[in-house]
Amino acid sequence: MASHFSLIEGKGPGNSSWKDVTVKLNQVVSQEAMQQLLSQQSALVFVLNYSTRKIEFVNQEKFLGHRLEYWGKSENFRKKLHPSCQGPFKNFWKQLLTNGESKHSFKVKNRKMRWKWISVRAKTLRWNVNNFPEAFLFTVIKNEDLHVFEDKLSERIAYYNAVLNAGETGIFAIDNQYRILLVNDCHQKYSQRIFGQQYRIGTSAFRYIPTGLRLAEYKKLLDAALKGDEIQSVFKLKKQDGHHYWAEFDVSPIYQQKIIIGALVHAQDVTGKIENEQKIKAAHTNLKTIINNTEDAIWSIDRQFRVIIANETFSKLFEKYFQRPVHPGDRIIDIISDSIKDLWLDRYAMALDGKKFEVKENYTLQGRVYYFLTNFNPIIDEKGNVLGCCMYSKDITEIHTAQEALKEHNQQLLQANEQLDRFVYSVSHDLRAPIASSLGLIELANLSTEMDELRELLELQKKNLQKMDNFISDIVEYARNARQELKIQEISFEQTIQQLLEQLSHMQGVKQIDKKIEIHQHGPFFSDQNRLNIIISNLLSNAFKYFNPYEEAPFVKVKVFTSPQHAKLEISDNGIGISEKHLNKIFDMFYRASNACSGTGIGLYILKEALQKLNGTIQVESEVGFGTTFEVQIPNHHHRLHTEHDSLIRGR
């Protein structure tokens, strides 16, 4: 309101005082200077010659839609005046002529015939030789907003009172002496119900301290607001009937021209709110206890990818994998590795679109591979809006391992069944063939009377029986290799090879084959002697069996190189060789790559099984007509021997 009356109260346009304007105008010596000064004013300023009734100077061409010459005539101004302002207008001029200055507010019509309020201030500018006023300086300000405000003031006061009393919150105000300034109806009813009394304007606020609230606490609350702080506090109080309730006080300062003159207090019963919060807190605690005591990783995010919940299992896994902790409020998509960020962003986006799904994947943590099954579930409110998503991730490493082991076991069973089928067929065929042949030879012998023919038939029968014996020996070796555990002992390759050569010396053609042995054994070597015999014996017997009888200098070379880690055996010959199309099948059960000699077809299969037991490997190179080379590598099992020895000592 003061701004509207600034000129009337002594302040001129442009923040100049009325006295300053008068002094400056009296100092003006030229019409040009006068015009320049007046043009700088924001209000309407003009000089009226009282004698001629003409305007000498003016800073605006029009005012309220009329040119200034129109307003210079007193009768024109009277025509535009509101009837209620006719009397005050006469008094305005009377006071101006008598006292030399006058001020008043008038209601006038503009060119559009609408009523507008203006404030007029006039002061004598010059006197004539008879000391009678000759010219007046007028300052006119449009202040219709002021009067509109004044007209609506009572309406607004009524409105504010209605607002003050409309809510369910008790409101009262105090001055800086703690005296009650106002109290709304809600608080009066509340006070009557709780304390059995109502507030009285002008009395001390300390007369109405709720039961259960100490004077020092109440005063501290009010003093904080009187010092400029806004305070919110909740207290557990007691009613007249002895029942407890919770009350919330919001206290804030009241300012007048930047000076604190009191405090405004909002008070409301929040018992229901507090009890609900306590129930929610208890439920949250129970839920938190449940999710933190599960072995599954549980976490949830909102639509901005901010973490809402992260249980202890998830937090530990997250920190272990990403080398940083995760907390509620963290934007999870910003703190995971760039290598998987896009992948997880797509998954979260699917869940936030309302889709439920699960993902099985593995992660390597501290050198170990873990498998997880993660379920993605959208969080949907009653209206069907997706608020976020919740994830449950279960460590299925043991289940996965068991499933893989089961798959492998089933595969082994299938393979064993196939091998058993072939085994039964081959055994029945390879055993029945020499038996049937022997029976035929016996029938021929019964019909023959010649001794030479009988000797020949007996020799053939002997070969059939030897073939059957060799086959049975191979079967026994196969069964022993499949059933027996490893028996580790120190190995002498020189002694082993010499013994095997002696055992195979009866084979046909062995004596005409040049045997070249080269052994480089450095340090002790440990392995299973029986399985090593199977491996070397089969390779040597094949080299002897399939030698090339047309080769002028047939040979078999054996080279052995050992180290602390492994042994490398190389057995080569210049025999008949193996066709390339057979090389990838020679280790299959009962497979024969050549018809040159009648073998059982199980030797190399047993060799491969024995190598697998020893964690060894074998490679073969061969060319028909030039010979074959087998290269075997077997690990040194010295560490296993020491482990078994230590276990035996601890067992004692």
Image: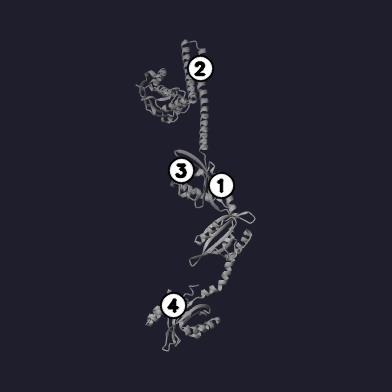
Find numbered disc 3 in the image and state the secondary structure of the residue it sits on.
helix
**Is residue 174 depicted above or below 603 in this figure?**
below
Neighbours of disc 3 within 10 Å: few (<14), some (14-19), many (20+):
some
How far apart, in angstroms, are the residues tagged by discs 1 and 2?
A: 88 Å
Tell me the CA gap for discs 1 and 4.
Answer: 72 Å
Do the CB atoms of the residues marked 1 and 2 lie less than 8 Å apart?
no
Q: Name the residue under label 4.
A: 18
What is the CA distance from the residue labelled 4 to the residue labelled 2? 149 Å
Residue 647 appears left or right of 207:
left
- Between marks 4 and 2 in the image, the one whose residue lies nearer the viewer: 4
At mark 1, the secondary structure is helix
Which numbered mark, 3 or 1, is in the foreground of this view?
1
- Distance, label 3 to label 1, CA atoms, is 28 Å
Mark 3 or mark 4, which has the lower sequence index? 4
Inspect the image, locate mark 2, and give the three-letter code of the amino acid beneath it.
Ser
Q: In which quarter of the image is residue 524?
A: top left
* Label whose residue precedes the other's in the sequence (3 or 1): 1
CA–CA distance between discs 3 and 4?
Answer: 79 Å
Closer to the camera, 208 or 407?
A: 208
At label 1, the amino acid type is Thr
Name the residue beneath numbered marker 3.
Answer: 321
**Label 2: which residue?**
438
Dots 1 and 4: beta carbons under 8 Å? no
Front in this rendered view, residue 581 or 485:
485
Q: Depth-wise, is mark 1 or mark 4 nearer the camera?
A: 4
Label 4 is placed on what type of residue? Answer: Trp
Q: Which residue bears the numbered disc 1?
A: 285
Label 2 crowd bin: few (<14), some (14–19), many (20+), radius 10 Å = many
In the image, 473 versus 212, the foreground residue is: 212
Tell me where residue 515 sits by quadrant: top left
Label 1 packing within 10 angstroms: few (<14), some (14-19), many (20+)? few
The single residue placed furthest to the right in the displayed view is: 241
